[in-house]
Image: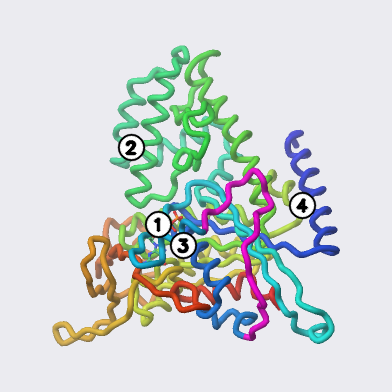
Amino acid sequence: MIIGDIADGLTRGVETTINTVSEAFFEPVLRLGVTGLSRAGKTVFITSLVANLINRGRMPALRAAAEGRIRTAWLQPQPDDTVPRFDYETHLAAMTGAEPVWPESTRGISELRLSFRVQPTGLLAGVTGPKTLHLDIVDYPGEWLLDLGLLDKGYDDWSAEVLKRIEPRPEAAAFRETLAATDPAARLDEPDAKALAQAFTGYLQAARVSGYSDCTPGRFLLPGDMAGSPVLTFAPLPPASHPRGSLGREFARRFEAYKREIVRPFFRDHFARIDRQIVLVDVLGAIHSGPKAVEDLRQAMADILGAFRPGRNAFLTQLLLGKRVEKILFAATKADHLHNAQHAQLTAITEALLAEAKTRADFAGAQTAAMSIAALRATTEDRVEQGGRTLDVVRGTLMDGKRAAFYPGRLPEDPSRLLNPARQGADKWLDADYEVMSFAPQPVTLKPGDGPPHIRLDRAAEFLIGDRLR
Ligand code: GDP
């Protein structure tokens, strides 16, 4: 074991003790992690969840809310001084009101504290007064979890894997060209290093747009305040032994620095402290992009969720010291693109897509569930007759302001009809095409006591935090 691991473990141990002591004597804190790949819907989810927990008129499936036991819920200054606060007010103002727009997406980690005064149930209900629960919501990119896989790898292994994977991809053409013109054994020249790193980042961005999910190192896509620093200025090179002072040697060193300075601190300071987790997945978006994107999403999710099975990784095992995430919810987002007649199919596909990853998490003792949700409902449901058939459609306003009725295609009852061709590397779906439209948020006038319209956000909240509001 390396010294860093021991030190990480000790810090974590002290922290656990402090938390336990403070929870016993003071007010309990529950940390809810919200993650998912970029554009999965994290920002919209947190904003709408918080708004709907403060104004609970649309939360009938959250039992404590339905039973009227939540006296009040309010935002507090968040406790972690070095983590940016989730910009709830700006995001909510964007999403609601007369001319709503989608808020700006997650770019890094942020946090928000929502506190509840709750009347307890059970034996003590009549005796004790209301109790307080602090819910710390931590928003972080799913791409950062993919980086866990890097900890077990040396630079050469990582490079070989990446270069093999991107070989057939047109998105990597420019990077391959820059790489071919580079001599890794030559003396390090910073402009060359930068050009190569930029070409690689360009590839990652293009791959992400094309629907690929295996886009590590995660910080290359979402660098935050690390942009341009040497730990983010490297790229994979064909494995070879390079002389001291060469580009190849320096890239190998920077790869190690990336793991030490970026990946490990994130897991130690943030990930290891999470109690409950929601993983948002844009399953519909991947289905729309085609079988390759679905297979890629399946693999990326298996990697992401590997982080919830600590036994797999020595560093994490040491860090967590037996602590585990108690509940994990996998949520297929943007379900308002589908009429509710098809939500069961979407959930079944999500479950099947995550089957492997889910078993791993179950194995770690976490309680898991899958659900189809829309954090902000942008459509209404309707039925239209077309060519003698009745279609279940949704209606909404497109981003260009036009109103449209939309039928995305019929999802199969049996998820393997999608997942098998995806695993077998099919180029396109055989029986059908699946469309996705970008709807703008609907203008809403919220009644006092109501949060923004959603689908199953209340059920998601009941699963994630309901037991702590009893
Ligand atoms: P993040 O990158 O995970 O923070 O993703 P965002 O929360 O910014 O969401 C990305 C985009 O997905 C948004 O700009 C919306 O276009 C879309 N989106 C997210 N949630 C919903 C939803 O509940 N319904 C619909 N129709 N679109 C959504």
Per the rendering, the mark at residue 172 is 2
Three-letter amino acid code at the position of disc 3: Leu
Between discs 4 and 3, the one toward the N terminus: 3
Q: Nearer the viewer, residue 287 or 375?
A: 375
Per the rendering, the mark at residue 295 is 1
The percent position of residue 35, horizontal first and vertical second, equals 53, 56
For residue 342, side relative to residue 267 (left or right): left
Disc 4 to disc 3, C-alpha distance: 38 Å
**Quarter of the image where the C terminus is located:** bottom right
Q: Which residues are magenta?
A: 67-88
Three-letter amino acid code at the position of disc 4: Leu
Q: Nearer the viewer, mark 1 or mark 4?
A: 4
Three-letter amino acid code at the position of disc 2: Ala
SS assignment at label 2 = helix
Give the labeled residue for mark 3. 92
Q: Nearer the viewer, residue 411 or 69?
A: 69
The percent position of residue 96, horizontal first and vertical second, equals 41, 66
Mark 2–mark 3 contact, CB under 8 Å? no
Q: Height in image: 314 above or below 382?
A: above
The residue located at (40%, 57%) in the rendering is: 295
Three-letter amino acid code at the position of disc 1: Glu
Q: Nearer the viewer, residue 377 or 215?
A: 377
Give the labeled residue for mark 4. 321
Q: Which is the main secondary structure of the residues drawn in magenta?
A: loop
The residue located at (64%, 84%) in the rendering is: 68
The residue located at (42%, 50%) in the rendering is: 213
Between discs 1 and 2, the one toward the N terminus: 2
SS assignment at label 3 = helix
Disc 4 to disc 2, C-alpha distance: 40 Å
Could you say which quadrant of the image residue 421 lies in?
bottom left
Q: Nearer the viewer, mark 2 or mark 3?
A: 3
